[in-house]
Every structure is written in C-alpha cells, then in structure tokens.
Image (cartoon, rainbow, N blue to C red):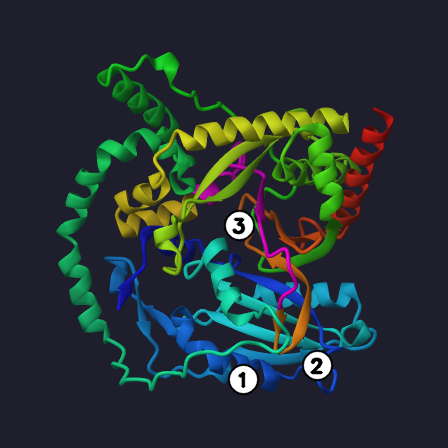
Amino acid sequence: MRQLTSLDAQFLAIESPTTTGHVGMLAVFDPSAVPGGAVTLADVLAVLQERMHLLPPLRRRLAEVPLGLDRPYWIEDPDFELEFHVRELALPAPGDQAQLAEQVARISSRHLDRSRPLWELYVIQGLPDGQFAILTKMHHAMIDGVSGAEILGILFDLAPEGREFPQTPAPGPIAAAPNQLSMLGRGVAALPLQPLRMLRAAPGVLPHLDVAPSVLGVPGAETMSRTLSRMRNLANGTRDGDVLERPKMRAPKTSFNGKISPHRRFAYGSLPLETVKTLKNRYGVTVNDIVVSLTTSAVRAWLIAHDELPDEPLLAQIPVSVRTDEEMGTYGNKISIMIAPLATDEADPVARLMRTHEAMKAAKDRHRALPAAALQDITEFIPPAINARAARVALQMGTRQGMRPLYNVVISNVPGPPIPIYMAGAELQHNYPVSVITDGAGLNVTVLSYRGHLDFGIIADRDQMPDLPMLIDALRDALDELEQAAVEA
C-alpha cells in the first residue's frame, strides 16, 4: 500500500457531478507502414500486456479511508482486468476533425470508475487516410505532466519495430483488498499525527499560503500570508523591500468563469514550431512566451467576438513541474503553480507579446523565490478532511455573485520529443493534450511540442463556450499577426 500525498488527494477532492479529475492525450497515428496497413485493438492490448510490469500505477486502485479521516491509499488491484480499461470505437464516415473532437468531449465528460484503476484507453478508428487515434484518460491523482510523459515513454517506441523488454517476471500473490474496518483503523491511528505534522510544517508554510489554490480564495489567507512573510523577513534581518512583492492581481469575470456543467467541448490544432522559434529569436523572448501570448490573443479575440472583453487583464494559472531528477519514475504529482496576468487589454500584438514576456519573467522570479516544495508542504499542512472541502469551496467561491474567480484560464506548455515515435509500429503524427476544467475556470489550453509543431488541446464547458473551435482559428491568426509585424518592423 502507498498513501496518496495531499496534493494527489486534492485532484480527487475537486471531483463533483460536474467536475472530473482526469487528464489525457489524443494521439493520432499513421499505420501505413504497418504490415496490413492497420493497427487493431488486439495490437494495442499486446503492447500494453508486454509492458504492464513496467507501469505499476496502471494496476493500482484506490482504498478510501472511511469518514475522510486520512488520505486514501493506492493498492494493487487483486481483480485487475486489462480488457476493461482498453476499448475500441469507430467514427462514422467521413471521420473528420469535428467528429473526433466531439467524441473526445463526450468521453472526457464521463467520470472514471473509482472501484478500478483510474485510467482508460480508447482506440478510435475511422479517421481520414487510414489513420487512427488513441485517447487516454488517467486521473490527475496518479500523474502530473512529467510522470504522464514517463508512462507514454514506456508505451511508445523510437523505431517502428519496437524494442526488446526483459522477460515479464512471474506475478507474485496479490493481497486481498483491505476491508473498511482495517482502513478505519488506519485513519484513527493517523489522527494524533496530524497536529504534529501541522506544527512541524507551520514555519515554512504559513508565509506561502497564497500559492495554494485550495487556500487562495479563502478570505484572509492572502493578508495572513503577506503579514507572516514580512514578519519572518524582519526576524531574519531581511528588509521587507528586499522581498519580491506578490502582485495584488484580481481576475475579472467572464462567461467561462462560472459554474460548469457536466458536459465538455474539445478543440485541437497545430502550429509550426519553426515559425514560433523564428519569432522567439526575432523578439528576444522564449517559446513559452510566444505560446502564452498566442493564447492571450486567441482568448482576447473570443472575448471581443462575444462583446465581453474586460478593461483589465485576465489571469492565468500556469502549472510548473518541481520534480527533481531523484523523483523521476515515482509518479504522482510534483507541481507548483504560477499566477500571471495575460495582456488581453492590449490591442497591439507586439506590445502584447512584450508584456507577456515581462509578466512571465516576473512570475518566474516570484516562483523561484518560493521553496521548491511550497505547494506540496501547504497541502500536507492542512488536515485531509479540511483540505478536501477547502479545494472545492475555493473553486466555487469565485462563481458566487459579487465574487471574482481565482484565475480565468489554465495554460500549460509541456515539451515533447523532437523525433518520431511509434506505437505498435504506427508513427505518431500529433499528440493533443486533453486536460481539466473546474468551477470558476472553465477553459484550459494545454500545448505539447512534438517534432516540428506545437499541438494545442483546448477544453471548455459545453454551454459556456459552444464555439470553442474559434480559438484554434484565432491562434493561427495571432501567429500570422506576429509574423506580419516582424516583416514590417
């Protein structure tokens, strides 16, 4: 048994009838070089079967502690059935982009079964030109962006012919799942340790309360955090002016910052990485600055089209990996977050990019000033039962009348492999991320680089953004706009 961290458990806690906690990828493959020109469900099952011993998270399921007295545990599922998790479907002709996006949205809207390991994989046939897709769903409690990439690294190969794996060890006996009475005993035994854990963590945690989404929206948390930070610096002999001041930013409200429905829309598309790199060099910024600026431009275009562009900048939550080399292969979540303003109030595309560059630099400087494990420590500091409620309450507070959301949109940029990769002999063409939305933040834009392009996966609430594909067109227009500005400069 292995207990979830508080951060892992928060991704379970945010789930509700309208909110799911899983993330995934829509991978599109070309099987033309495979003998027979097709990859079947049986082929994908064979790849998984060959490699399951290298993927322990895929065989684990939850063991909950009654009454929420302590965080859940991962246990080896004694009834694991691979075929339950791997499914196949086919799009009706013509199998176009809109049909695939709709199927992804429908599958992503459905919760994972908590009585089984928290993942599913769909083989989707019927795409144009003989292509097929694989859609994965894995609960965020299992993985973050980096550990998810590690799993894909085991499933994918660097050559069409695959690779040799050590012989699968004979499985040992799997213990029966613990009963509710034994889990209750574990929870009761852990209760006396929780105050000790809080006291031990308090000095390092309290000055940084405002980096935790589950605490950020609670009235007084930000003021307490600032005050304690100043007190600590005075006690250490550090002048308050020497400390990076946290910006007093407040997110405006938009139509995608209300309570979400159970239903999703998904849109996807790609931009040429070489063009982005050329612009990066031309303007002296980073690839991530370009990605965030293009996203800002696309969201701005959507807001203008719907006559609701705020006078003040939107705020983005930007996840950041804090996983060390020693923690590679441990799965789970090792992330922190940055909150940064988006220059949606800037009409000029170049000025918008330069403001993005400055905002991202400032956010990174503030983030570097925090302890690497600040977010992890904060979630460990809060008792499990309170932490679960705080995560839900903080997200919902921004949807109430007169309250502002914590942030408007989530933007994540994940580097991927620059070389071709394969599965079951088929070559990966694109890998579009499929992420999470919540109450108060009904829009998520996640980007994965692969070979010569940036693959954008955008997910939103179905009712809040019915014309979501507009954002893909707006991203392309924003890139053209920056290119044109560079030519004219």
Asked whether 425 falls inside the magenta stretch, the response is no
Q: Amino acid at mark 1?
A: Ala
Question: Which span is picked out in magenta?
Answer: 394-421
The residue labelled by disc 3 is 438
Disc 2 from disc 3: Cα separation: 40 Å
* Residue occupying image coordinates x 34% and y 38%: 374
The residue labelled by disc 1 is 46
The residue labelled by disc 2 is 34
Pair 2/3: label in front = 2
Asked whether 397 falls inside the magenta stretch, the response is yes
Disc 2 from disc 1: Cα separation: 15 Å
Could one spot residue 459 in this view of the protein?
no
Q: Earlier in the sequence, mark 2 or mark 1?
A: 2
SS class, disc 1: helix
In this rendering, the answer to whether 165 lies above or below 234 is below
Q: How many marks?
A: 3
* Residue occupying image coordinates x 76% and y 37%: 301
Front in this rendered view, residue 200 or 34: 34
In this rendering, the answer to whether 232 lies above or below 281 is above
* Residue occupying image coordinates x 68% and y 40%: 295
Q: Give percent across and percent down for residue 120.
A: 52, 72
Q: Amino acid at mark 3?
A: Thr
Disc 1 from disc 3: Cα separation: 36 Å
Q: Quadrant of residue 264?
A: bottom right
